[in-house]
Image: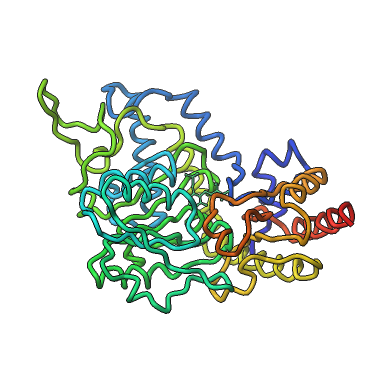
Amino acid sequence: MMNVEQLKKDFPIFQHHPELVYLDSTATSLKPHVVVDAEREYYEHYGVNVHRGVYALSEQATAAYEGAREKVRKFIHATSTKEMIFVRGTTEGINVVANTYSQNFRKGDVILLSEMEHHANIVPWQALVKWIGVELRWIPVTEQGDLDLTNIDELLKGVKLVAVTHMSNVLGVVNDVKFLARKAHTVGARILVDGAQSVTHFPVDVKDLDCDFFVFSGHKMLGPTGIGVLYVKEEIGKTMEPYQRGGDMILEVTKETATWNELPWKFEAGTPNIAGAIGLGAAVDYLNQLGMEAVWIHEQELAKYGREQLAHCPGLQLLGGNAASPRGAIFAFELAGIHPHDVGSILDEQGIAVRAGHHCAMPLHARFGLAATTRASGYIYTTHQDIDRLVAGIKKVQEVFA
Ligand code: C6P
């Protein structure tokens, strides 16, 4: 059982805003001291470049940067650090694949997405419709908020790549990507899993899932902004062209041509986000200390409690409230007759931070006939009292608009 009140002391933001009810962790998580300290220590004690210098400080920076890579490798159970490419975040990770792996695609090839994708897992593929003439196909979402896999065999015909989210940033549902990976592989397709929300909330084993690509962002899992990971199975990474070209990603350059460095550095052109990677490593250490199983138990309890409490709010409709899939503490809802932006503003006046809008998932909102919702989302530092404050805050909103 996690001691949330004790754990909150690790997060400096609560010292600056003791009354804050932070329910926007799906957008970004708060950062514990250890992450901020790890970045500061790098800049203050050994803040030099990696892979280049022959002096001790540079070796120290390189060891810390590559050490962070090893930590994230272990965290998602990848086989080798060659499969762990540091990128800016989920968005960049997906763009790398869309820009380079797409060299395998031909006109008429199909990419299978789902209706619950974040725009980051839609828009890069739409570019390939224009550039190559691929077709996008969609796994529907049921009224309850689950992926509708009834016709999955039909949907998979002609598919070269399945690109799906592991956990929806709106519905909070967890999709069975292991099943989808097996299905994709039976038709010779690859699968990319958007792990932006999953890796933060429960244990992930990319080998067990057998996904070909897995992407996530550091800032949603207690780490810094501007750092994330693209996991690519080594046999696939080897065949892919670099995404960007420049320093550090080369083996040899002549006036005419160049050859590429080994994996993963082939995909890391230029000076990387060294401090960010080290900060992410510290976030992984922190999460490991808590234990990801414990994080998920806390999250599911919070999800259950939140659903029960929100059910008492008259006129509140939870998106995907009856989904059968496992789910985390993400509550996107409509309040009858009140615009989500008004809900968000009045909650903010009460010290409750939520997100209002389409949450970068417009096709999903369109699926439910909505333009926007209010979204409250929790994480390891979220308490039942935070949920109670939200429910009281919603009542206040309704009083204002009565
Ligand atoms: N979702 C949200 O408020 P970046 O911005 O690259 O770190 O992550 C993009 C992304 C991709 N996939 C999923 C499932 C996501 O939830 C996100 C980020 C935030 O829901 C910010 S829009």
Residue toward you, 193 or 103: 103
Q: Look at the image and name its color scheme.
A: rainbow
Left or right placement of residue 18 versus residue 207 in this view:
right
- Whether 46 is drawn above or below 217: the answer is above
Across and down, in percent, residue 278 comes to 44, 37
Q: How many marks?
A: 0
Left or right placement of residue 313 versus residue 26 in this view:
right
Left or right placement of residue 237 versus residue 151 in this view:
left
Q: Residue at x 11, y 27 (%)?
A: 257
Which of the 4 quarters of the picture holds residue 11?
A: top right
Residue toward you, 114 or 177: 114
- On the question of residue 376 being in view, the answer is no
Across and down, in percent, residue 139 comes to 43, 67
Q: Residue at x 51, y 55 (%)?
A: 197
Residue toward you, 177 or 120: 120
Across and down, in percent, residue 97 comes to 31, 48
Q: Residue at x 45, y 59 (%)?
A: 165
- Whether 144 is drawn above or below 387: the answer is below
For the C terminus, give its image quadrant: bottom right
For the N terminus, give its image quadrant: bottom right
Residue toward you, 200 or 170: 170
Across and down, in percent, residue 209 comes to 36, 66
- On the question of residue 172 being in view, the answer is yes
Q: Residue at x 35, y 71 (%)?
A: 155
Which of the 4 quarters of the picture holds residue 311?
A: bottom right
